[in-house]
Image (cartoon, coloured by chain):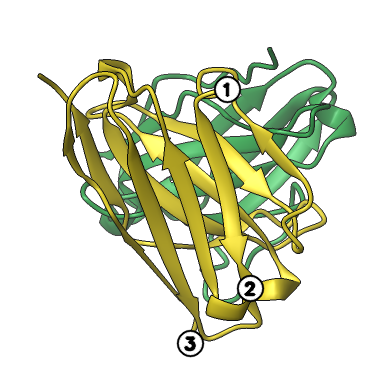
Chain colours: A green, B yellow
């Protein structure tokens, strides 16, 4: 089955840049999406089609890809950006696949 | 505004069945694929199943294939998940989500409904 890999945790100081990676076989040939989930809340889409931001998502969130790695960057990280971030893609079934998640802590 | 409201969760014994529903409003339901995603306590997101706009096509995750059935009623703007032969590892919050299509991701999510499988 298709798998995505993310670092378990990322720590960042307020105002600094947080970078979260997501890797998978042939991920560069698929679209990647990113979701933010705060404790006790439903996930929120923050990036779709690798690099695009839904309306209402702050400009400090950006996405990029290189080879088989997708990256979510949070510039000028704020306390409200804490939580879990999940990457997601579709395998060949097609079925959705989520990465294991990355816990972002703003110290 | 788009709203997705899940219902039907609860406590069920191993081997039992449960039917979840998701009431959609604020958009043309029949224009979108719909998806179920679950999250076990303290764990990450797990994709469960999706269904095409007309309901003709559906896909399932390996862990639920053969036990769960997704369906929809476009006249009632409703999505369903019939869960049979439930196991302890099916314990999770179940979210319904709208698939924006074309790699645009799951753009709206419900608040989730908790399913607990325990004797």
Q: Which residue is mark 3?
A: B1
Tell me: A31 left or right of A21: right
Q: Chain of mark 1?
A: B
Of all residues, the one furthest to the top in this rendering is A1
Mark 2 neighbour density, 10 Å: few (under 14) some (14–19) many (20 or more): some
Q: Chain of mark 3?
A: B
Q: Which residue is mark 1?
A: B66
Looking at this view, is A75 or B79 the one in front? B79
Asked whether residue A82 appears in the rendered view, the answer is: yes
Residue appearing at x 55%, y 75% in the figure? B77
Say yes or no: labels 1 and 3 on the same chain.
Answer: yes
Tell me: A49 left or right of A34: right
Q: Which residue is mark 2?
A: B74
* Marks 1 and 2, the one that precedes in the sequence: 1
Q: Chain of mark 2?
A: B
Looking at this view, is B80 or A84 the one in front? B80
Mark 1 neighbour density, 10 Å: few (under 14) some (14–19) many (20 or more): few
> Residue A49: x percent and y percent?
77, 51
> Residue A1: x percent and y percent?
68, 12
Disc 1/disc 2 C-alpha distance (Å): 24 Å
Disc 2/disc 3 C-alpha distance (Å): 18 Å
Circle 3: element type: loop
Say yes or no: labels 1 and 2 on the same chain.
Answer: yes
Residue appearing at x 52%, y 60% in the figure? B79
Circle 1: element type: loop
Asked whether residue A17 appears in the rendered view, the answer is: no
Picture layout, residue B50 above or below residue B101: above
Residue appearing at x 76%, y 63% in the figure? B54
Looking at this view, is A68 or B45 the one in front? B45
Residue appearing at x 72%, y 60% in the figure? A52
Badge 2 vs badge 3, beta-carbon distance below 8 Å: no
């Amino acid at each position: 089955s298709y798998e995505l890999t993310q670092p378990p945790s990322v720590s960042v100081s307020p105002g600094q840049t947080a970078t979260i990676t997501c890797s998978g076989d042939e991920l560069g040939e698929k679209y990647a999406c990113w979701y933010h989930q705060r404790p006790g809340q439903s996930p929120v889409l923050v990036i779709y089609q690798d690099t695009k931001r839904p309306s209402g998502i702050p400009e400090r969130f950006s996405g990029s890809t290189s080879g088989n790695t997708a990256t979510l960057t949070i510039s000028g990280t704020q306390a409200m950006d804490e939580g879990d971030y999940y990457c997601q893609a579709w395998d060949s079934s097609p079925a959705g696949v989520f990465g294991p998640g990355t816990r972002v802590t703003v110290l | 505004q788009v709203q997705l409201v899940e219902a039907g969760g609860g406590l069920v014994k191993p081997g039992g069945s449960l039917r979840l529903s998701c009431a959609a409003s604020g958009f043309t339901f029949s224009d979108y694929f719909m998806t179920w995603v679950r999250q076990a306590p303290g764990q990450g997101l797990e994709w469960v199943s999706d269904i095409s706009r007309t309901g003709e096509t559906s896909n399932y995750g390996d862990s639920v294939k053969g036990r769960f059935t997704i369906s929809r009623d476009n006249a009632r703007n409703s999505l369903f998940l019939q869960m049979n032969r439930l196991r302890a590892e099916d314990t999770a919050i179940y979210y319904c989500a709208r698939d924006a299509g074309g790699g645009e991701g799951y753009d709206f999510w419900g608040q989730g409904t908790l399913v607990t499988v325990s004797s």
